[in-house]
Image: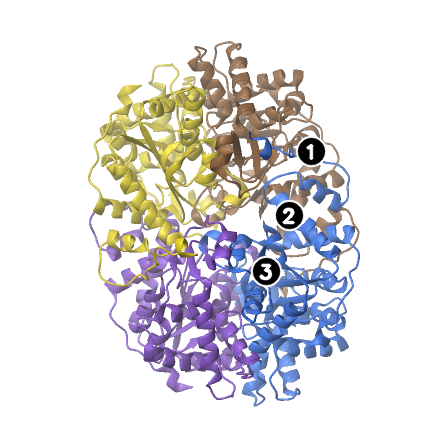
Chain colours: A blue, B purple, C yellow, D brown
Amino acid sequence: MGRKYLREPTEPIEVRSRKISELTDAMLKTGFQGRKLAQAIEAWSAMLDEKELTIFMGLSGAMVPAGMRKIIAYMIQEGFIDCLVTTGANLFHDIHEALGGKHYIGSHTADDNDLYKCGIDRIYDVFAEEERFRDIDHLIADFAKNLDAKNYSTREFIHLLGAEISKKGEKDSIIVSAYESGLPIFVPTIADSSIGIGLMLARRAGKSLPVDVIKDVDEITQMVEKSKKTGVVYIGGGVPKNFIQQTEVTSSILGSGAKGHDYAIQFTTDPPHYGGLSGCTFEEAVSWGKVSAAAKKVQVYVDATIALPIVSHALQEKSKKRKKVDWNSTF
Amino acid sequence: MGRKYLREPTEPIEVRSRKISELTDAMLKTGFQGRKLAQAIEAWSAMLDEKELTIFMGLSGAMVPAGMRKIIAYMIQEGFIDCLVTTGANLFHDIHEALGGKHYIGSHTADDNDLYKCGIDRIYDVFAEEERFRDIDHLIADFAKNLDAKNYSTREFIHLLGAEISKKGEKDSIIVSAYESGLPIFVPTIADSSIGIGLMLARRAGKSLPVDVIKDVDEITQMVEKSKKTGVVYIGGGVPKNFIQQTEVTSSILGSGAKGHDYAIQFTTDPPHYGGLSGCTFEEAVSWGKVSAAAKKVQVYVDATIALPIVSHALQEKSKKRKKVDWNSTF
Amino acid sequence: MGRKYLREPTEPIEVRSRKISELTDAMLKTGFQGRKLAQAIEAWSAMLDEKELTIFMGLSGAMVPAGMRKIIAYMIQEGFIDCLVTTGANLFHDIHEALGGKHYIGSHTADDNDLYKCGIDRIYDVFAEEERFRDIDHLIADFAKNLDAKNYSTREFIHLLGAEISKKGEKDSIIVSAYESGLPIFVPTIADSSIGIGLMLARRAGKSLPVDVIKDVDEITQMVEKSKKTGVVYIGGGVPKNFIQQTEVTSSILGSGAKGHDYAIQFTTDPPHYGGLSGCTFEEAVSWGKVSAAAKKVQVYVDATIALPIVSHALQEKSKKRKKVDWNSTF
Amino acid sequence: MGRKYLREPTEPIEVRSRKISELTDAMLKTGFQGRKLAQAIEAWSAMLDEKELTIFMGLSGAMVPAGMRKIIAYMIQEGFIDCLVTTGANLFHDIHEALGGKHYIGSHTADDNDLYKCGIDRIYDVFAEEERFRDIDHLIADFAKNLDAKNYSTREFIHLLGAEISKKGEKDSIIVSAYESGLPIFVPTIADSSIGIGLMLARRAGKSLPVDVIKDVDEITQMVEKSKKTGVVYIGGGVPKNFIQQTEVTSSILGSGAKGHDYAIQFTTDPPHYGGLSGCTFEEAVSWGKVSAAAKKVQVYVDATIALPIVSHALQEKSKKRKKVDWNSTF
């Protein structure tokens, strides 16, 4: 009577010359997080085959210092995502690198007091120069001083900033790629970053540029309202995850008929049992109506710096460039 | 030659009738996270003895549904903290309960699709009624509709909302206690919560009430600039942690002479090795100048729902009420 | 229609003077791991009220260096457990302390190469002297040299060693308390510890004392076979957990009618999603017949050095000494 | 003055067609656990280039049900390891599959009580038939009944069992590959597994076959004593890790001049801060003399089911078959 549970055997992975996506396909027949990683690639690949699906990515964690910048830029350029919600820090670091700045290979066991004395900031095992970061703080402050004194959603502000950086920065940058693709970037936590510090420096210098994050709620909700189906990919958790999740609640309250996202993928290292939103399961999200009960749902417990290189390369082998929508022109 | 390392033996805990703070004092002689928990209480207690110290608390996670609301209210009332940075969700849930709403004892293994059909939201092992939450969404929208159409920092908006709730809500509420104590609450992620949804409903109804989070950066930085010494207590990580951490960077850029926080405590379940800010060590923070190299620094890896009851009761036994400053009147 | 899910509201913890068990009782009305901790105390307390229940404790992790020794000894003396399965290290460190040796309060950020040069071993934030440990290695080797050259289960060997230590060691020791209570201690991983090293030194010195771990499987299975009901408490996971879990499988194969343990509590920091036995849920254990579907099951994600002091003191306040069975005389 | 810290910039990963090892080489220039994974491959590759190095692998976790069996067999066959310390479960499941048994693709959210009623065991998201497992229990019991009644180290017993399985089992099995390569497998936790259950069934049937785990301590220590240099690779933690780690302590006590392992790699999901051996850092191991201060040391926080496929394929591309030593003939 256990037959129903014994449909498909696992298959031990064989070691042999093969492509990345062939290996991840083989991992579909294994167990634990290795299988989940393969299932996430399968689900994302299925999303790319959908005709009328809007894909939202939530990106948290210091992904740019950790070398993930061009992977995100690639995903924007290829149409693997349609909207990005991220932290101010990721964009700040992206601008820093786009303009020629560097992060450095460091060590997580360095002497932090000596680093401080040397003006070096540590991000786990990556180093950066505080002075170069401050150059960018001032660049943002100066840019803000030249903008019209009106309310901006973070999306609008980032779009304008992207236009500016695109004039002199590297093309394989997140903010430049997004600008050129018309892909909206929302930064609901902009105050909590060096971009926020830059804007505050402008404010103290007499140029108050209000950033209206409620306008962002409005705009991202419009995207959901205009989309036939939606899929979500979360790199980490934090505000980017919930900000995208709550669009379904908001549009449900507004009566726009939302029934939960149709695909949901997360790469995270947060377990569910501490009750936080970052680690909560997509099953829990079903109870809220944030994710559809029928949705393909995959959560993988893995550091994003392992997942992103593998997943992006597997998708590159498996999937074709996808048509892009210039969402920025729709608001 | 190892003598320098062998100064003080550990002492096995004996089981006997004693007060909570006597037990945590005994835990100072143990090891691992048990000792850290005891050291966190010792450090917080030392903060309360300081004459000119401003204590900032960062509070993330769904602490109110998990029954931690009155502990935070108590800490505000007793002067155990001077400023709170938290999520919109915690305040939303606080208002819900202050006005008589409930959260319910649930199960983390419930059937989420059935919960959805029943209109029940799950937060790990706590349940809530979606309809009652929507009542509060509309209450916030209606409140917003009656405010002057100008830019507000989240602190200003929450202060005004606190005044409103204090008229009809329970006293042992976070927002009411803060209102009555003049304690500033910053919610830099307000857009990412049901309060943000409420404000967006007002916006869609024609009443745009811009929330200017850059003004928050300015105001919290003023608090640091006006404080002789600063201490920080983080319940979880997320934006509340970094938003307080970065005040030291901001005031350093402004030349206000910041040298890093003088005390730093965190209760978290995030390990440092995934490179995220939530889990990064206070040693890493030293490299950035966010925490002083000389600061008393304690990080405890534990769920806040275990830490907060123990810590608050131990402090209640050990510490006297502390003089409060009406910071809200200083902006 | 969601009424069935909304039976009991959570109740915010109030901060006031109270006993430890009063606080943990209040935590029953909260959420997340705080509630689980309270439920674990409630379940253990219920076990102590059962008339014909045998309680097995699995104890892993360096609990003795971390100051938990007398808590375990207390639980043995009061009859809070009937059988202990633990690591060689915990007993080795217990003997070390029982004979006057010390562990020391250290730091997890110490310079390990300097520690090595100084002959200091580090266990996270606890230090010990390598030379004093080697004294105990030789003590165990010498003790083994004087035993009859026959096969011993680890239980038998530990019982004999306990008799020896009881002649000169402190009473509040784990091995001495067990010896005096007739409580069996199984150490299926004895080879993987300094006790194993001691026995190997005896072996190299010509005195081979075979430790037959299969005899242990036989003996602990007998305990289950003779018990009407069984309860399990796991401090951490590892071999101690599975060795107790598998007794139900073994006795089922033998046709002894086992139906799974009747109570199951675990304090652990291992999440289930990596597929390991240490972190697997008691629900998973139900599928194997290791735990009864009807059993009271509580898993708490928390460091044992936080859980054990709280739980032992709450039980001390709530529960009476329990009648002990001299199991060692039954084999 | 921070120049010393800013030697090598990180380099963002570019997404393009490339081999697995080319991708992992690129990951050497990133940060966090992605870089660590790449460094682990680099360190293992360096081990394979060493002339007189003995490589010990510690393997814990249910790796065979999760599809990792042929990867381990491959590593044995290619000489990527010289000795294996693992759990009884991994060998039991290996024998099960070598003889045609299967594990099945399951779900971590299955109904465990129904699984129990159907005779299906769950290992996170993998299923197995309890009855087929019992067949193997009896096969092992029967095999044991035919052995001479003398003391065996687990290595000896597994070697004999490997000879038996090699007669009828698949070649790409762990136990068969090891048998045919003369590679020693130690199972210090044999009692804590279905192999232990099998031996206990033989014992209850009158054939007591003592397994002397102290003899294992002797034998593995001999391997270290006879090796010029040693390297260790840990898949997970548990007893397999410490059993290999402690060989350096044992040989130091015996005066064999051990100075700590020369290479050390671990793939784990256990953080260090709970004080357990599974998660403790190799820096901590330096204080004990288990790992040399000069050793190349890499710890990667990742599920082994993700790491093993990537690492084995990268090594397959980069490294040549290594000369094998028939260690089993040296005891």
Q: Chain of mark 2?
A: A
Residue drawn at (29%, 31%) of the image: C53
Q: Chain of mark 3?
A: A
The residue furthest front is: C1
**Can I make out residue D229 in this image?**
no
Label of residue D27 in the image: none
SS at badge 1: loop
What residue did someone put label 2 on?
Answer: A37
Snapshot quadrant of residue C320 = top left
Report the amino acid beneath label 1. Answer: Lys
What residue did someone put label 1 on?
Answer: D51
Residue drawn at (47%, 75%) of the image: B138
Q: What x and y, as percent, mark residue D97? A: 63, 26
Report the amino acid beneath label 3. Answer: Gly
Marks 2/1 in contact by CB < 8 Å: the verdict is no
Q: Chain of mark 1?
A: D
Residue drawn at (75%, 36%) of the image: A16
Label of residue A260 in the image: 3
The residue furthest bottom is: A206
